[in-house]
């Protein structure tokens, strides 16, 4: 029987006042069909800022490609102690409940989440929100809309580690600034 990150029933009142979850993934490549999630991070955000965080390294069966290790710093050895996706994804779903999922280039991240969920007979049905689309709409004059570029333009430190939790923190700063009234 499939399980879901989002139930069809109204969400129970949240004691932490959460309104959305900003999340990011690190993967072994660009294709949800053959590549895998190796790190999941998320920030549960309410009216008073970040309420809780989630981070999981995901153990995979294959080796991490060298270019991914160079980009992220994530090694095969680091993933040996990680949870398999069969534990990490349900843990993530429990963390996010039915909250909207915000990401910088949400189509990429949702593609991977949904592909892994399908393999596990799960569904991820949370409403997606794309911070990248908002950046493109509000800052059309920028030469590109990479997270690092937009963060620098908005005056935030833009050292991007390509680690999921660090990218969540930078992406959330950008998203909050772009969505101010």
Image: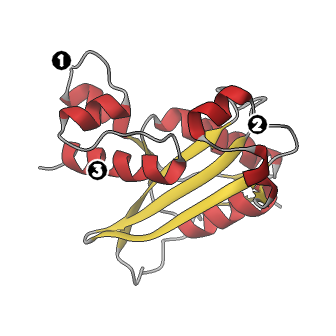
User: How many residues crowd mark 3 within 10 Å: few (<14), some (14–19), many (20+)?
Assistant: some
Residue under label 2, please give it: 64
| 137 on left or right of 19 | left
Figure check: 160 above or below 172: above
Helix, strand or loop under label 2:
loop
The image quarter containing residue 129 is: top left
Figure check: 156 above or below 5: above
Q: Are marks 3 and 2 in contact (CB under 8 Å)?
A: no
Helix, strand or loop under label 3:
helix
> How far apart are the two marked residues, 3 and 1, measured between alpha carbons?
20 Å
| 140 on left or right of 1 | left
User: How many residues crowd mark 2 within 10 Å: few (<14), some (14–19), many (20+)?
Assistant: many
**Numbered mark located on residue 141 in the image:** 1
The residue at 26%/69% (across/down) is 47
Helix, strand or loop under label 1:
loop
**Numbered mark located on residue 173 in the image:** 3
User: How many residues crowd mark 1 within 10 Å: few (<14), some (14–19), many (20+)?
Assistant: few
Q: Position of residue 51 (x, y in %)?
A: 38, 73
């Amino acid at each position: 029987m499939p399980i879901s990150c989002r139930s069809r029933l109204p969400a129970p009142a949240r004691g932490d006042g959460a309104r959305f979850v900003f999340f990011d993934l690190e993967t072994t490549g660009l294709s949800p069909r053959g590549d895998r999630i190796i790190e999941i991070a998320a920030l549960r955000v309410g009216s008073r800022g970040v309420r809780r965080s989630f981070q999981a390294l995901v153990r995979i069966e294959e080796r991490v490609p060298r270019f991914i290790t160079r980009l992220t710093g994530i090694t095969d050895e680091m993933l040996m102690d990680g949870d398999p996706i069969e534990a990490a994804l349900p843990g993530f779903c429990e963390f996010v409940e039915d909250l909207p999922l915000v990401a910088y280039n949400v189509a990429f991240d949702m593609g991977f989440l949904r592909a892994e969920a399908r393999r596990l007979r799960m569904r991820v049905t949370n409403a997606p929100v794309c911070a990248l689309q908002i950046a493109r709409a509000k800052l059309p004059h920028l030469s590109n809309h990479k997270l690092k570029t937009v963060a620098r333009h908005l005056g935030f430190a833009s050292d991007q580690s390509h680690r999921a939790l660090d990218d969540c923190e930078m992406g959330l700063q950008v998203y909050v600034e772009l969505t101010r009234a």
